[in-house]
Image: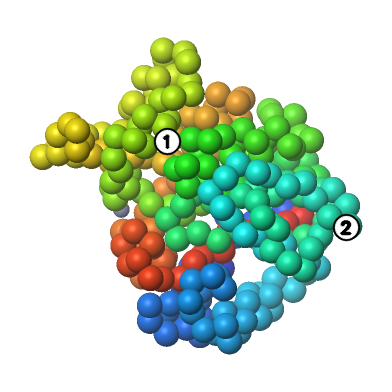
Amino acid sequence: MAIHSLPWSVPANINAFYTSRTDGFGSPPYDSFNLAHHVSDSEDTVLKNREKLQSLVPKARHWQWLEQVHGTEVLLIDDANALSQQELTADGLVCRVPGVVCCILTADCLPVFFADRWGREVAIAHAGWRGLAGGILEATISKMDAEVEDVVAYLGPAIGPCHFEVGAEVLKEFLSEPAEPENQLEVMACFSKVRGSEPPEQKYLADLYALASQRLKRLGVTQISGGDSCTVCQQETFFSYRRDGETGRMLSAISFE
Ligand SMILES: [Zn+2]
């Protein structure tokens, strides 16, 4: 199956899914359902994969693709004029127009899905560690119309704490912002020291899912699910940049009717 619907509780008018690497047209190292144009896969293959994708989501009226830059810019689509046939440069989208599929491409970075529990608004964010530490989730929530207690969130497939080895600079970046001592402790609990590494070359295994969850909880989001995959471990299902370097990208997408 190329498309996996999210197992979360939201109204039936919301369609949210992520793709796996399977059932596409590509050959190694892009085998086979790569949906990204920027990774040196053949243009034709990507177009064929996107055609197949679009046939699997027949109700979609517009696919909004992004050029993601590991930043914290979130764009708002609140009328049909905000739509573009081009990629928009941003790492998050908030959408209040029915039929618009908001698209994020990843291969290890964390895609975070958001829906208003009344089904009137959706959002999606691309949260690699830089975007996460920079505040992409906070920026997304603040652009949403929904009250924060009405926001439902889902953490899509990303590199897991079993494989996300980082240097001390990543921990430092996450510690640079939360001033409260209990928040600092929470952040530190998401980094476990890799045995055999020592300062100044200390390595950590970082838990992106836990870092994202604690930020969402601090914002007041209580309905959070997902966060149980590892793109590196699940080689048959997911592309992983950390594991393979040159490889494809999965799509995470959300829309409402
Ligand atoms: Zn893993």
| Residue 185 % position (x, y) | 36, 19
Circle on res. 116? none
Q: Give 103 or 59, whichever is nearer the viewer.
A: 103
Pointer 2: residues within 10 angstroms few (<14), some, or many (20+)? Answer: few
- Please tell me which residue lies in front, 3 or 110: 110
Q: Looking at numbered disc 1 in the image, what kind of residue is underneath it?
A: Ala
Q: Residue at x 62, y 59 (%)?
A: 67
Look at label 2 and name its amino acid. Answer: Ala
Q: Secondary structure at mark 1?
A: helix
Q: Nearer the viewer, residue 19 or 74?
A: 74
Q: Can residue 150 be seen by looking at this rendering?
A: no
SS at mark 2 in the image: helix
Mark 1 sits on what residue?
Answer: 210
Residue corresponding to mark 2: 80
Question: Is residue 61 among the parts visible in the rendering?
Answer: yes
Q: Residue 176 location, x and y as percent?
A: 44, 24
Q: Residues within 10 Å of mark 1 (few under 14, many from 20)?
A: some
